[in-house]
Amino acid sequence: MNDHHTVRVVLFDCDGVVITGKRFSYYLHQDFHLTEEETAPFFTEHLLDCIVGKADLKKELQPYLVQWKWQGSVDEFCDYWFRSENAIDSRVIDVVAQLRSQGVRCFVATNQEQHRTTYLREMLQFNQLFDGVFSSSDIGYTKGSPEFFARVLQQLQPCTKEELLLWDDTQQNVDVAREFGIHAEFYSNFNQFQQKMKEYSFN
């Protein structure tokens, strides 16, 4: 054991930790021959407003779908998108189930727009597999802002900063969380995660 306080709540990043596999841009290229050059403006500009809940994904997508010569509806596009990124790592889910059986609360903390957040909660059953989902589109900030963690902590009261642990595969999110004062670990693979978890005591 290290000097850490007992962890009572664990936050898991969604893409890259709970969900593994290739990014959506890979499938757009493979299935529709769309280059990153063609899709980047949407993902690097317009998607960001959707992720913090300032814009609606389906509305923002419309002009791009015309540009990308998508034949179906915007709903069909979203369905194709969400289904292409839904490979859950069952090993992580097993750890979550084990932690929850010990009384440790487990949540997904994700930079996510509203429609996929709903998909994760309902279709992928994150609301059952976890104690809940903290999504940037609900909170109004991404994990790149300390405000994200401040809002999460508010909702987790009486949990303290020292009792909170984040696992994320984006170093910037880990750094921000640590600066905010919660425990945060960089996720590189499942074995490393398993080893590192041994250093913490739970509940």
Image (cartoon, rainbow, N blue to C red):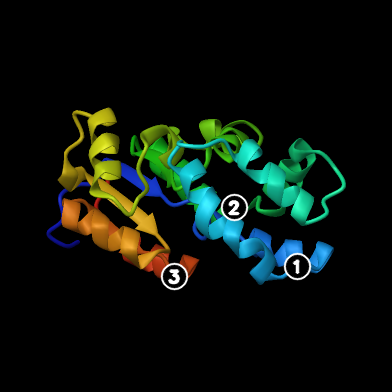
| Residue type, label 3 | Ser
Examine the image and state in which quarter residue 103 appears.
top left
> What is the C-alpha distance between the residues marked 3 and 1?
26 Å
Q: Is residue 27 above or below residue 143?
A: below
Q: Indicate whether 44 appears above or below 37.
A: above
Location of residue 110 with respect to 170 vertically, above or below: above
| Of 177 and 5, the residue lying toward us | 177
Q: Residue at x 32, y 54 (%)?
A: 144
Pointer 1 local density, CA inside 10 Å: few below 14, some 14–19, many at least 20? some
Q: Is residue 154 left or right of residue 67?
A: left
Which residue is under mark 3? 188
| Residue located at (62% from left, 31% from top) | 122
Q: Which quadrant of the rendered structure holds the N terminus?
A: bottom left
Disc 3, SS: loop
Residue at mark 2 to residue at mark 3: CA–CA distance: 16 Å
| Front disc: 1 or 2 | 1
Residue 203 visible in the shown view? no
Q: Amino acid at mark 2?
A: Ser
Pointer 2 residue? 90
Q: Marks 1 and 2, Cα distance to the nearest angstrom?
A: 27 Å
State the SS at label 1. helix
Q: Which picture quadrant has residue 192?
A: bottom left
Q: Secondary structure at mark 2?
A: helix
